[in-house]
Image (cartoon, rainbow, N blue to C red):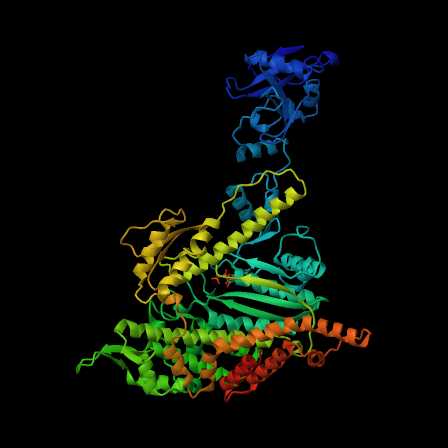
């Protein structure tokens, strides 16, 4: 029945063309056994030879133990599927179905062979792993027609034949070279920054992706916007798109594309007012919140969440921008070859002669806050143009010329603060500091409209109020520099918050003040990517912690929830092991010993220093696998993040953690004759309260209208159409929302029209609201 042709080659195919029944075929059988001796057995078999007989002949030819059990499997692609044959199957029949070339003797790497494997007594197969097929082998296989031509790019990484780092990167690179910058990994979109314009974002593309199932068309960022939009409408559930990536990878650009598509979908191709305002808001936020860094010429130094609100019909209603963590430290110092916030350079290079005089501007190289670290401006022409662009964008968002002037005065004052210098008093027994130069102090006092005497006090002395006394202590030299920088940072940060608030005001649909409608929303989160610089400080610590949380969110959704869903649906599934980052999150934020809690504790303890803080970190977390030890004398600690190890310098952690506005500075700025400066300082508690009210009002009114409708139905016995002016409903119900609503309207009035005494107006309303609450 079977002929052992030994290890020799010998051609396959018919042995005797004239006698079909007597034909025999040369099968290549490879043993895959734990104790493997021979590499191959070429066995000549007849057409009607069963698997059982082929197994026994092959075992004999290979000198295997006849007392053991074996199975025979057909393999078509090396490393591919294996079809185990039943004892009564005819292997030669399978062989005859193979391509012609596969029936000739060929190397194993080309596939089409049989495998002889050991079988356990319970019927299961005793598997032994083989080395994977190489790329060259695959190519040979394809060249010989045994494999379909290789597909060299996969739009979805989930379809890759082999999923490993190498294959993923090769696929992304191949696609990128074909100008396909987007690739899916299931429902996640991977974008590779092309650093050049691609004509794939015009309205034709919005239309093309509209209401399409994800994956049907070439991957695209518009497809993600489209899925979010239609899922929101179909499920009536708010959606969120999370963008993550390292600095310069294209997060902000992607956010802009998403917002464009999200508003265009709603407007059926026409640009909406909201989109225009968002587009205007972009350059304003960029000018004040972006800077040139080592990684990106236009790096966002703050995180943001843009929420587009829709009516239930899918029409855009308005939008809200929320900002997170502006990198304030950049204002006073930064890494080599990096710049301060764009707006300073725009102003200094773009201002007219008249504006220079009005804001007392100097050339950029004369400001200490700008000239540190390899100061060189090579793009003067662009900066001048950007100043014009900024002015235009400010107008689009509704900044009046007077407001712009106020903002530029504050910017100029911030720059002058950097030029304040200190010298130890050389005469007398006074141990204080001399502050100067006089012309800088005079200009600062002019720009901020504060008394020079008070300004000098705030810059040189700390006031502490105790139960019975008021202590005034002179700052040491380093404390004074910290106080000066703190004033600059506080002013800039308040200015940025005010701008965000103003933009939100422009984005808010004014009708929300008059009528309530149920809304849905899609949010786009664009935060800093993971950072690891030469020197990492508190900012990097916060940014990387936020990214750790994002990673956890991904893990949770991609692995945990998906696997739970499979199990719930009864799909056979082996849980996938993945790197869980919960340990790192606990190290940072778990009560009571997480690093953030220890930091808060040490920030509030009067005698603590950065050194005692570091000692506390080490003492609590020595031995934690996410807290990597550092040499005893090194003022730093290392965290093992999901994305790699990062060393953080402990210097200024406490100072930055408690970086609230110093009371002395608040008091000084509140004494300003410039209403705008007082407004900035008052913003913190009051304007945030106001914004909270607006938000709560918009949400509350929806619920409230519903209550009004029920009330009307109950009292009249008939269901009436809903009034489009909720004030009527509000007055009838006497709900607390009523007060809130009216307060919000009044606050809005103050915000827009009371240049004279806005802060007092805020405070009055705030106090009256508090008393009636
Ligand atoms: N899809 C794209 N097409 C063309 N250019 C792009 C695209 N995405 C990004 N870029 C270019 O790359 C630059 C950097 O992108 P972007 O500022 O969006 O990065 P980022 O991830 O937000 O960086 P950071 O975290 O530093 O703010 C952009 O200024 C733009 O020129």
Closer to the camera in the image, 176 or 451: 451
**Horizontal and vertical percent for residue 603?**
36, 65
Q: Residue at x 31, y 85 (%)?
A: 439
181 vs 671, left or right, is right
The reply to whether residue 351 is visible in this rendering is no
The quarter of the picture where the C terminus appears is: bottom right
The reply to whether residue 252 is visible in this rendering is yes
Closer to the camera in the image, 263 or 567: 567
Closer to the camera in the image, 23 or 498: 498
Q: Quadrant of residue 536?
A: bottom left
Q: Quadrant of residue 452?
A: bottom left
538 vs 240, left or right, is left
Q: Residue at x 69, y 23 (%)?
A: 94
| View extreme (front): residue | 468
**Horizontal and vertical percent for residue 97?**
70, 25
Q: How many marks?
A: 0
Q: Is residue 243 above or below residue 171?
A: below
Q: Residue at x 36, y 68 (%)?
A: 333
75 vs 34, left or right, is right
Q: Quadrant of residue 253?
A: bottom right
The quarter of the picture where the N terminus appears is: top right
**Horizontal and vertical percent for residue 380?**
42, 73
**Horizontal and vertical percent for residue 359?**
41, 84
| View extreme (right): residue | 718
Q: Is residue 555 above or below residue 393?
A: above
Q: Is residue 388 above or below residue 179?
A: below
């Amino acid at each position: 029945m079977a002929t052992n042709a030994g290890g020799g080659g010998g051609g396959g195919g018919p042995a005797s063309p004239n006698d079909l029944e007597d034909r025999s075929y040369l099968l290549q059988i490879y043993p895959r056994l734990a104790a493997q001796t021979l590499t191959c057995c070429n066995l000549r078999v007849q057409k009607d030879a069963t698997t059982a007989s082929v197994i026994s002949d092959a075992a004999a030819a290979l000198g295997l133990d006849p007392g053991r059990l074996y199975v025979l499997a057909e393999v078509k692609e090396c490393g591919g599927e294996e079809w185990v044959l039943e004892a009564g199957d005819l292997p030669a029949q399978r062989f005859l179905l193979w391509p012609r070339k596969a029936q000739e003797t060929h190397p194993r790497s080309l596939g089409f062979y049989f495998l002889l494997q050991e079988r356990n007594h319970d019927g299961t197969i005793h598997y032994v792993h083989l080395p994977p097929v190489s790329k060259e082998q695959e190519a040979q296989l394809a060249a010989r027609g045994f494999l379909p031509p290789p597909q060299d790019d996969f739009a979805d990484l989930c379809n890759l034949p082999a999923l490993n780092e190498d294959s993923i990167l090769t696929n992304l690179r191949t696609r990128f070279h074909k100008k396909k910058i987007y690739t899916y990994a299931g429902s996640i979109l991977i974008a590779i920054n092309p650093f050049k314009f691609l004509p794939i974002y015009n309205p034709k593309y919005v239309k093309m992706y509209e209401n399409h199932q994800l994956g049907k068309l070439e991957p695209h960022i518009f497809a993600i916007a489209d899925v979010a939009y239609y899922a929101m409408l179909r499920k009536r559930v708010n959606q969120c798109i999370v963008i993550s990536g390292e600095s310069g990878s294209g997060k902000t650009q992607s956010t802009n594309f998403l917002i464009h598509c999200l508003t265009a979908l709603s407007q059926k191709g026409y640009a909406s007012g909201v989109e225009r305002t968002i587009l205007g808001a972009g350059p304003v936020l960029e000018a004040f919140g972006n800077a040139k860094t080592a990684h990106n010429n236009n790096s966002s130094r703050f995180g943001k969440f843009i929420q587009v609100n829709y009516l239930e019909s899918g029409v855009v209603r308005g939008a809200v921008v929320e900002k997170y963590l502006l990198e304030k430290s950049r204002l006073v110092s930064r890494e080599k070859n990096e710049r301060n916030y764009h707006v300073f350079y725009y102003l200094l290079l773009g201002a007219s002669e008249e504006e220079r005089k009005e804001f007392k501007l100097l050339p950029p190289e004369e400001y200490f806050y700008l000239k540190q670290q390899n100061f060189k401006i090579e793009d003067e022409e662009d900066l001048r143009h950007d100043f014009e662009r900024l002015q235009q964008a400010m107008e689009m968002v509704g900044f009046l010329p007077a407001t712009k002037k106020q903002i530029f005065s504050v910017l100029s004052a911030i720059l002058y603060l950097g030029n304040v210098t200190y010298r130890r008093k050389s005469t007398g027994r006074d141990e204080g500091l001399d502050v100067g130069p006089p012309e800088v102090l005079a200009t600062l006092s002019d720009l901020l409209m504060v008394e020079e005497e008070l300004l000098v006090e705030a810059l040189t002395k700390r006031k502490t109020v105790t139960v019975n006394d008021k202590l005034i202590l002179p700052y040491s030299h380093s404390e004074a520099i910290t106080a000066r920088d703190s004033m600059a940072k506080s002013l800039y940060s308040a200015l940025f918050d005010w701008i965000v608030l103003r933009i939100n005001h422009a984005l808010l649909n004014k009708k929300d003040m008059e009528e309530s409608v149920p809304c849905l929303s899609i949010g786009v989160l664009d935060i800093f990517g993971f950072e690891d610089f030469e020197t990492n400080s508190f900012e990097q610590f916060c940014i990387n912690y936020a990214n750790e949380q994002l990673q956890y969110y991904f893990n949770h959704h991609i692995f945990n929830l998906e696997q739970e869903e499979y199990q719930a649906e009864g799909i056979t599934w082996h849980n996938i092991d993945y790197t869980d980052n919960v340990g790192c999150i606990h190290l940072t934020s778990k009560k009571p010993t997480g690093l953030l809690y220890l930091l808060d504790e040490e920030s509030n303890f009067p005698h603590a220093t950065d050194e005692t803080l570091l000692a506390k970190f080490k003492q609590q977390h020595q031995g934690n696998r996410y807290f990597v030890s550092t040499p005893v004398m090194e003022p730093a600690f290392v965290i093992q993040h999901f994305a790699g190890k990062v060393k953080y310098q402990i210097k200024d952690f406490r100072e930055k953690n408690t970086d609230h506005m110093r009371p002395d500075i608040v008091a000084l700025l509140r004494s300003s004759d410039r209403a705008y400066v007082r407004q900035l300082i008052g913003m913190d508690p009051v304007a945030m309260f106001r914004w909270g009210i607006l938000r709560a009002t918009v949400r509350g009114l929806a619920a409230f209208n519903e209550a009004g409708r029920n009330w009307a139905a109950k009292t009249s016995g008939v269901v009436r159409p809903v009034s489009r002016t909720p004030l009527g409903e509000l007055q009838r119900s006497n709900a607390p929302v009523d007060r809130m609503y009216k307060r919000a309207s009044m606050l809005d009035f103050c915000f827009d029209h009371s240049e004279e005494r806005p802060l007092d107006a805020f405070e009055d309303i705030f106090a009256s609201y508090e008393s009636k609450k």
